Image (cartoon, rainbow, N blue to C red):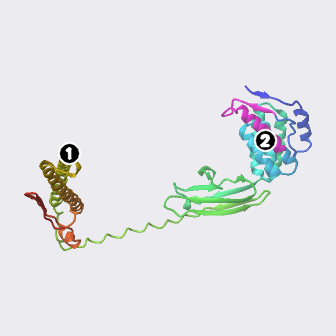
Amino acid sequence: MLECTAASVNVRGALNTVKLRPNAFVSLGVVVLCSSQWALAQPTAVDKSLATELFKEGRALVDQGHVSEGCRKLEESQRLDPGGGTLLNVALCHEKEGRTATAWAEFTEALGIAKRDDRPQRIELAQSHIAVLEPTLSRLVIHVPPAADFPELEIKRDGSVIRRAAWGTAMPVDPGDHVVEAAAQGKIAWKRSVTVAARSDTKTITVPLLENAPAAPALAASPAPTQLAPSAPEPRPSSRAPGWVAMGFGAVGVGVGSYFGLRAMSEQKTANNECPLEQCTSVGAHANDEAIKAANFATVGFAVGIVGVGVGTYLLLTSGGSSAHRAATNAPAVTASISRAGSEIGVAGSF
């Protein structure tokens, strides 16, 4: 079932006018847009409206002498909303453009659509142009000799694959330059261009036997591994014990400093209470002396703690190297002792 929407009824008179001028366009006035069951997909309303506008612009451009530009718009109109009337206009445009083989094929297709839709005016128009074009068609023959044929051979004309059944057939082509290519896996690709004249010209291209592609270069044999003399065993990483020992001394020093610091503050508080107006009792004098001693011990303790933590950190960070490396970098070693004799603390160390 065919569904059509006509915007003008002036088609019959226009087609009668075209009968007197075979190369003229179908004067449809306003394009007739049709959709039928044979279409692969129904165009949307937006597609139809754009196709209508493109059709009008294309016809106007062709009438103004801008044939190629007008053909592109008509082609797009037909793509968006395929129809027999638009296809006839596309074929007429391509005929004006000199693309005789393309126009002939489109007139042939439009003829089939017109017969199916029972459109006698379109049938007559298509038949008249086919009759004019067919004797003038130029053709191209792609000849593949048996010696050059093998199953993997692929032939292309202007980028389109030409199946084996079409080899040797005089295929209609538009006038102008055409490129024929032959390729196969493991073979050197072949390409040839040919120019076909405008009227009744036939050119033949023979595809040669393709040459084998150069073999890929063989990979060089890997050299035998060189026998190396046994290397000296890698020195084992030195122990981290010295670093941890130094860190221990540091921790002890901080602890001692903290203890005596707190004691110094306690004794100083007692001395302050027992020594009003710069006169001290025996208890205040003794507390003052003890505060001074505790403060000195705290100072030494914190000093040892800081040095111990610093040296320990350094030793731990550098303990992964060899002993030779440590000797070369003069890494410090540390020994420390804390002793209390009476009111003194002794610290011994070498860094």
Label disc, if present, on residue 54 of the rendered structure: 2
Q: Nearer the viewer, mark 1 or mark 2?
A: 1
| Location of residue 27 (image quadrant) | top right
What residue did someone put label 1 on? 273
Residue 228 appears at what percent x and percent y?
A: 21, 73
| Residue reaching furthest to the left | 341
Looking at the rendering, the stretch of residues picked out in magenta corresponds to 32-59
Residue at screen point 26% across, 71% down: 224
Q: Residue 293, located in which quarter of the rendered image?
A: bottom left
Q: Secondary structure at mark 1?
A: helix
* Three-letter code, disc 2: Leu
Residue 195 in the image, given as x and y percentages of width and height: 72, 62
Q: Is residue 57 magenta?
A: yes
Residue at x 81% of width, y 42% of height: 89
Q: Is residue 105 magenta?
A: no
- Seen at 48% across and 61% down, the residue is 186
Q: State whether residue 339 is above or below residue 7.
A: below
Point out residue 163 in the picture as x, y percentages from the top left corner.
60, 50
Sequence-first tag of 1 and 2: 2
The C terminus, quarter of image:
bottom left
Q: Decide if residue 213 is on the left or right side of residue 136.
A: left
Examine the rendered structure and indicate whether residue 311 appears above or below residue 103: below
- The residue lying toward the viewer, choosing from 234 and 51, is 234
- Residue 121's place in the image compared with 318, above or below, is above
Residue 296 appears in the figure:
yes
Element under disc 2: helix
Distance CA(mark 1)–CA(mark 2): 109 Å
Observer able to see residue 227 = no
